[in-house]
Each structure stands twice: as structure tokens, then as C-alpha cells.
Image: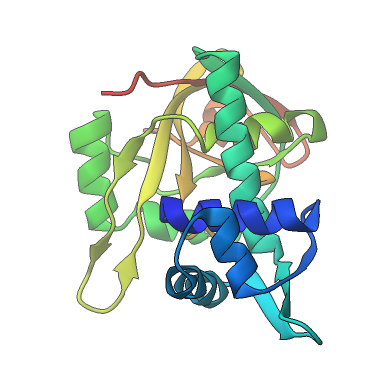
Amino acid sequence: MKPGLLITLYKIAETAGSIGEAKCTTTEIAQKLGLSQQTASRHLIELEKLGHIKRMKATRGELIQITPEGAEQLNLMYLTLQRIFEGPKREVLIEGEVFSGLGEGAYYVSQPGYRRQFIEKLGFDPYAGTLNLKVEKQSQRERRLLETYPSITLEGFMDGMRSFGQVKCYKARVNDTVDGIVITAMRSHYGEDVLEIVAPKNLREILGLKDGDSVKVRVFISTPQ
């Protein structure tokens, strides 16, 4: 998201006093931001198009409601600032439970546009499938925090028929035994309570895992280039 839009979203939340509903006018938002009314209005229009806010007419001005998607953007900003003030980490520990996916991981990982980048940037040809973990409640903060750290990025591409989005990659070790790569897709079919891991070979077979087994993943934080 553009920094200016994120600041506008923050000011809406500040006006509301929480991640909720704010009653205000475009002029008031503009004054809080130190922007012209036209610029503030443009920001609100863009935020609404992105699905981060909903706008409803009121007696005076309008009601602006921050959507769950907008709240997630603010939470990501909060986690990023928290990470900055806490200082850098070398690794993040995430625990989860194995579950069977829908087979979509195999489809995406097998795409030539991704496979080529796995080989070039990560040094291996991935097994056509992912190890899927339902993240334990105590690890969900770390899972979300992961999104704020530097990553090795696989660029999106077109295959002539459809587009494929960027994928963030983080080097990891599963159960302190086997190396793999945690991936977080920009357009994922899973939520943030799921962790997907790829490796050169089938992790389920190597580690003797079945659905319901608990797994510990140590994710290594890259140093910004």
C-alpha cells in the first residue's frame, strides 16, 4: 500500500479511537493530515476501492468504517514498528499441526516460472507439493510478524493465460532436522493461520509425518541487501 494511504487509514482509526467507525468529514481528515481537501478525498476514494474502508452518508459528513482488510494493513504497520523497536531477530520459531491441503501447492510450485526462480535464487528444484501446517495459537503472532521481515522474493509472471503473483521465501529448518523454505504468497489461497513449506523432497515422507502431527519450524531471518 502507498505510504500516504496507510497514514490516512491510521488517521481514520485515530479519529475513531479504535479499529472501528469514525464520523468525520473529508475536510476534517484533510486537516488532520495537513493535506488539501482534494488530496484527502482522493485517498478516501482509493482506500474504498482497495476495500480497506466503507463510507456511508451521515447527517453531517459521513461515517467511515475500517474493514477487516484495512485493519490488517494497520496491524501489519504495528508489527513492523514493533519489530523495529524490539531490534532485529535472527530467527522466528513457529509451531503448527500438519494437515492435508487441496493440492494447489503442487500446482503452483510446479509452474516453470516459479521453478526456475527456486533453482536460481534458492539453489534447488522443489518437490511438487507443500507441507501445510495449521499454526498453533501461541505462534500466530510470529507467523504474522514474519511478513514484516526481509525475504527472498520470487517475482510474479504471466504464462500467456493467467498471471501468478509474487511469493516471499524464508529459509527454514523443520523439526531441527530438514532444511526447507517457508513461502508466503501475495495472493494465497490460505489465511495467515497456515504455514506452507517447500523443499527438494517430500517432507512428509522424510520426516514420517501424518495429519495431526505437531511440527516445529525455525525460520531464519535474512539480512536486508
Q: Nearer the viewer, residue 8 or 205?
A: 8
* Residue 221 occupies quadrant: top left
Q: Quadrant of the C terminus?
A: top left
Q: Residue 224 at x, y = what percent?
A: 32, 23
Q: Please indicate, yes or no, whether residue 75 appears anywhere in the rendered image.
A: yes
| 133 versus 108 height, above or below | above
Residue at left offset 67%, top offset 74%: 25
* Residue 28 occupies quadrant: bottom right
219 displayed left or right of 100: left
Residue at left offset 65%, top offset 44%: 75
225 displayed left or right of 142: left
Q: Residue 48 at x, y = what percent?
A: 57, 75
Q: Residue 207 at x, y = what percent?
A: 59, 25
| 169 versus 176 height, above or below | below
80 displayed left or right of 211: left
Q: Nearer the viewer, residue 34 or 186?
A: 34
